[in-house]
Image: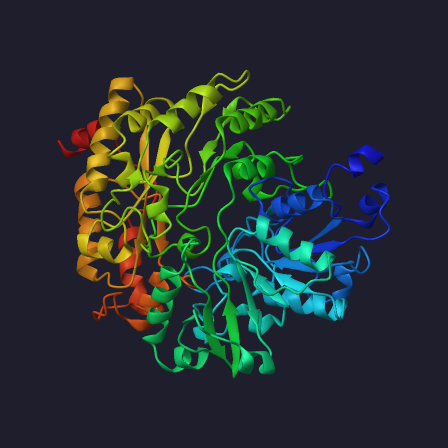
Amino acid sequence: MKESELTKFVPASAEEMEARKWKEIDILIVSGDAYVDHPTFSTAIVARVLLDAGYRVGIVAQPDWKNSESIKIFGRPRLGCAVSAGNMDSMVKIYTAGRRIRKADMYSEDGKTGMCPPHASVVYAQLAKKAFPGLPVILAGVEASLRRVAHYDYWQDKIRPSMLVDSKADLLCYGMGELTMLEIFGRLKEGMDLSGIRGTCRYLGGKESGAFDSEGCVRLPSYEEVLSDKSAIMLQTKLVESEMNPWNGRRLLQSTNGRELLVEPPREPMTSSQFDKFSELPFVGIPHWKYSGKIPAWETVKDSITVVRGCPGGCAFCGLVCHQGRQLVFRSPESVERSARKLASLPSFKGTISDLGGPAGNVYGHYPKNPELCKKCRRVSCLFPSFCKNYNANEKPLMDLLERVSSVSGVKNIFINSGVRLDLALVQPSQTKRIIEKHVSGQISVAPEHLSGRVLKLMRKGKAGEFESFRSIFDSVSNCSGKKQYIIPYFISNFPGSTKEDMKIVDEYFSKSHWNLNQVQDFIPLPMTMGCAMYCSEMSPEGEKIKVNKGLAERREQLEMLKRRRSGKYLPRSEERRQNR
């Protein structure tokens, strides 16, 4: 292979390290995902950010976790090792809601399973400790982020301490980690300690725990309290959520096995210019050359462009609340256009940008009317239980962006596939009409999640009737445009508090409409989410007792209600009326 080809990717082999004339690396990144050099893959973007800062970086993707030699291909790193399960929690990646092994791993070559171990962050950290004694090991990625304090593991059905405690790593980086990782390795380079870094957690030693001044800290229930009292995880979750604002969040302390776990306040989000820069680093845009098969997750996003981070929704089942946060960060239109031109220049590009989005497809350009008010706010959601008066759901930025990117030579279609928030779609009539008319690939994804007003309130998810209102708009605009298009809604069974009667509301709606479900998800209590706290404590955030289906036998009834309506597409209203006749 030519030297120019060997230096395109971040080194994932000794051969590539040597092609760059490096004798050693500064930082080793170990990941539970196959290495895809694309900015939607967390390993690639952190590696590119560190490489751009002048560090010599090597990646070991999906090593043999039973053999420490598998991560020694570059020799001993000079500064440290960062480990991550990848783009998903490893337990979600491996197991279904029914606690069965999934048939495919979307982040592995050809979907092969078994390439990533359960609790991968812990396994990789211990592997690095064994391979490189004394080397600083940093936990990062969404798995570590959402397991940074005591948490419930659904697949083991047990409370576990912070992943930092189990892994014996030196530091845990939570949230979106580019800026935090730059600070961490900048300190290691200068021989400085790692205390006081925003967006990190440390497990203090015995003496340091005893001497630590806790003034100004928020004390969480101890790990032992969470173990013994099922209501403690609800209190913990409410405290963590209330301290997620980076401008007023305080340090958290959690006593664990007689020592203190210290969680520093969240880091302020990156600026738009930083987002632009990081997104436009020289990503190759494809899987590493060592793979001959396909990486299913990349196949889904290869023609997409991420334009926004953060989510204002704060839904109870979603980890974004405590990972990306509700503060929105956008790429500039100029930067997005440059990415579109780069994408359009690729030989594999067929003219369609599959998505311009992020956590949601219709939040680009939304901003607070008064940013100073946001810095004082402790709300979990900007949109629930009602829209914040300081939230500006501006339609123009996304519409202008779509127009701008549409003019790029070689771009024939732009679709919004990130999922459209119904509550926002209903207050953005011009933008919603534009999306339905021009930016739907034949079907649009929405997430009503439920149709019972009581359950929607528990989910912190809009109001009953929003789906029906959106459906009317969608059908009307599609018919006027002369297009046969479909809504693909997403529903969850067995959310805490959802009874058989609540699920019958969903079942009867689709029975009456003669519709079949394409997407069905049985509730999974993801670590650190409010839904998980409700599942464990069997109470609402307000302290009311709720019904929770826990055993597979209990959960089967609601799931089967949805599954029997699965297969096929939703009928447009005109077709539904024809069948009803």
Residue 20: give x, y in percent of width and height: 83, 42
Does residue 177 show up? yes
Q: Nearer the viewer, residue 549 or 233?
A: 233
When asked about the image quadrant of residue 472, the answer is top left
Q: Determine the residue located farthest toward the left in the rendered image.
A: 581
- Does 341 sit left or right of 157 as displayed? right
- Does 354 sit left or right of 474 as displayed? right
| Relative height, residue 149 to residue 97 (above, below) | below
Identity of the residue drawn at 28% across and 42% down: 390
Does residue 312 show up? no
Q: Which of the colour schemes (rainbow, by chain, secondary structure, one colour) is used?
A: rainbow
| Relative height, residue 534 to residue 6 (above, below) | below
Residue 176: give x, y in percent of width and height: 52, 51
Identity of the residue drawn at 22% across and 25% down: 476
Identity of the residue drawn at 45% across and 78% down: 223
The C terminus: image quadrant: top left
Q: Nearer the viewer, residue 251 or 295?
A: 251
Residue 279: give x, y in percent of width and height: 58, 37
Residue 2: give x, y in percent of width and height: 84, 34
Q: Nearer the viewer, residue 571 or 182?
A: 182
| Relative height, residue 58 to residue 445 (above, below) | below
The N terminus: image quadrant: top right
